[in-house]
Image: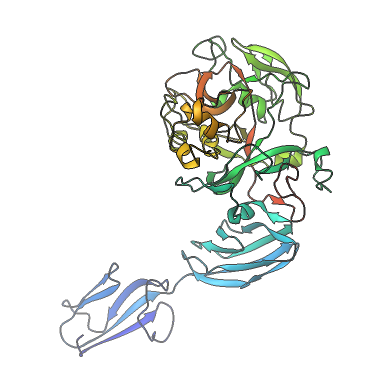
Amino acid sequence: NRKDVELAVKIEGEDGNLDHFPTKEEGYTYSKTVCDNEDVTTRATWNENDWGLDLFTKGPNKCTVYFNAPVKYTIIAEVVGEGGSVEPSSQTVVEGKDTDYFTVTPSEGTDIKNIECSNNQKVLQDENKFKVTSVSSNSECTVTTAKGKHLNTYLSTLVESDIASDGTYDNNKRYYGPNDENLKNYIWFNCDTYSGLTESNASQHCEKWRIIGLMNNVETESKGTQNLVKIIRNELLPRTATDSGGFSWDNKNTKTGAENAYGKNDWTTAELMYLLNPNNESHTLNNTTANNSLYWNSGSGQCSTGQNNALSSCDFTTTGLKNGTTKDLIETVKWKLGGRSSSTGAKPSDWYEAERSTTVPSGRKTEWTGKIGLMYPSDYGYATGGGSKYDRQACLNSATYGWDSGDYKTDCAQNNWLYNSSKTQWTITPNSSYSNYVFDVSASGRVNYSDASYANAVRPSLYLTSNTMISSGEGDGSSTNPYIIVP
């Protein structure tokens, strides 16, 4: 504020003075201060927090404050594929800042399939808008459009009476209600061809699967955290065309790697995991080739079906994954393997917390990276629609262990599309207090646990890739007209 001190502002390496004092928000960084009278009484100290100069000088003086010019990068956007436009076509932004939103207008009958930006720039998408966050380099963003509707976007905006937020911190959007034709979460999957599918012919080429929901903040193997659609096979997986028996979750004994004779509740080495997933073609159990990616490869051979390494014939030549197109639709994700010591008292929200915890049996891992898993106890819990005495919220506020009797069974279990009154179904979640117990959804309706060696029913579950498209003209999600995937 002294009138005898003249202050100028310059940019390093540039002629002329700035007409304003630069701000941190503009991307400038302080360099130095140089004064004409540089005697021992002159002190110039830059205060980064207050973004100002503390200057002490005796007598008249002229000082120049130098700043480094902001580093700026240009983000260019273009649309490829089935056409459309993006506005603006480019933005220039200061390093470390976010761009404003780009707005994409796909051509009629198309939707955004994918958005990728070069140089590892991260994209935040909000329906038909996106921005690049924390920009660190020049980048070209390619928006790919395709015929149909983007499944993730469609579900995120879908307003129906049978799909809603689960109220968790991830705010997943789940289907709920009884297992009837009015629940519109059916989708054709595992098709022998995806070309030319229509409402009238899809049943000849595909299996019915069910959408559990749009799950947020799923950790993928190589694409960061994404929001992904989770699906599950509608029918129980049979051993063969004539044998509808179930499968052991794991049936090792002390000779083959378990702590006792009833299997090992470690999904990362479970025999069922080896059966469902790729890259296990050489796997053996007790010196016998078994569970060796048979489901993944549509193969036939030996599968675990009972205590002490027991094996039975199994044949997935018609029920296994049919082709590379189907396999490419499956995302590789980090499945959470946390558990509980008991099912008593656990509400769906308690299960959700436990599954994502680090509470596991001694020596077990807390997560597994892979393709195909099973449902969680919380998936079952949140799928209830409730009934006349106990509505959905009352069911969600009750322990799933008690859903096997009285009005709880009638309202909470029997009005749950994941419930099967004929078979006990495996989940992926271990009992953390024991080395051999795994939680299941019993035929009576409760969540309980069994020895891993039991041959319970299996329904493979997986996450679709984030760029999955569905037909815009065929399929409404009903049992008679499931959604049709357009690869």
Residue at the farthest front position: 388
Q: Which of these two is toward me, 327 or 314?
A: 314
Out of 284 and 398, give the one closest to the viewer. Answer: 398
Quadrant of res 92:
bottom right
In the shown orientation, is residue 437 left or right of residue 295? left
What's the colour scheme? rainbow
- Dividing the picture into quadrants, the one containing residue 329 is top right
Residue at 82% over, 47% down: 197
Q: Position of residue 456 (x, y in %)?
A: 61, 20
- Quarter in which the N terminus is drawn: bottom left
Q: Count how many numbered circles sit on residues in the image.
A: 0
Residue 60: image location, x then y, percent: 19, 88
Q: Is residue 287 visible?
A: no
- For the point 63% across and 72% down, the residue is 89
* Left or right: 355 in relation to 233: left
Residue 138 in the image, given as x and y percentages of width and height? 57, 65
Identified at 61% across, 52% down, the residue is: 155
Q: Is residue 289 above or below residue 413?
A: above
Up-down relation of residue 408 to residue 290 (above or below): below
Q: Position of residue 38 (x, y in %)?
A: 22, 80
